[in-house]
Image (tube, rainbow, N blue to C red):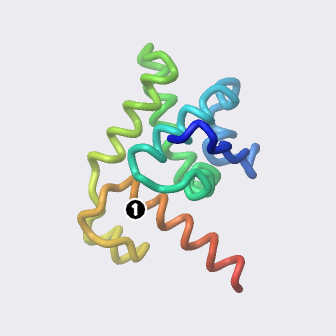
Amino acid sequence: MNATNQIPATQNEEWGFWGTMNEHASAAWPLAMTAISDATSQPLESVQVFLDSRHGRHFADDVQNGLYRGQPLADAINAATQQWMGWTIGRQTSKQYGIPRGLPYLTGFVIHCEIVEESQIVS
């Protein structure tokens, strides 16, 4: 990530990633934004929409699981990122969300959330 890129703030402090991370939210947000953007090659604005969604809450659950196992915050975020990148979109998820089969799960849902956000702005 380029140091000149500003990390967008959450637009959902109650739910999503931020709300699920509780007292870790302010430290976890920039780490997760950067890790996900780097892993998926998606812009920070798309990652922000993903993290603010219900899918971001599920991602935060996996980060919290790492913290529970004793991992430092950055390691828990990186482990969750790698876990989500290791999963691929299957037939059922592809049908349900319109995400191409075989795409890494994290990449697919970051792009999906961006498309949903854009379609709501246009509507």
Q: Nearer the viewer, residue 92 or 41?
A: 41
Residue 67 coordinates in the image, percent (x, y) = 49, 21
Mark 1 crowd level (few <14, some 14–19, many ≥20, 10 Å Cα): many
Residue 109 coordinates in the image, percent (x, y) = 45, 60
* Numbered disc total: 1
Question: Which residue is labeled 1 in the image?
Answer: 108
Q: Is residue 36 above or below residue 115?
A: above
At mark 1, the secondary structure is helix
Q: Is 107 left or right of 21, judged from the image as shown? A: left
Residue at 39% over, 45% down: 39
Q: Is 8 left or right of 65, judged from the image as shown? A: right
Residue at 52% over, 54% down: 55
Q: Nearer the viewer, residue 61 or 42?
A: 42
Residue 107 coordinates in the image, percent (x, y) = 39, 57
Q: Is 39 left or right of 16, judged from the image as shown? A: left
Q: Is residue 35 above or below residue 91?
A: above
Residue at 26% over, 71% down: 91
The C terminus - image quarter = bottom right
Residue 68 coordinates in the image, percent (x, y) = 48, 20
Q: Amino acid at mark 1?
A: Gly
Q: Nearer the viewer, residue 46 or 60?
A: 46
Residue at 40% over, 36% down: 80
Q: Is 72 left or right of 7, judged from the image as shown? A: left
Q: Nearer the viewer, residue 18 or 48?
A: 48
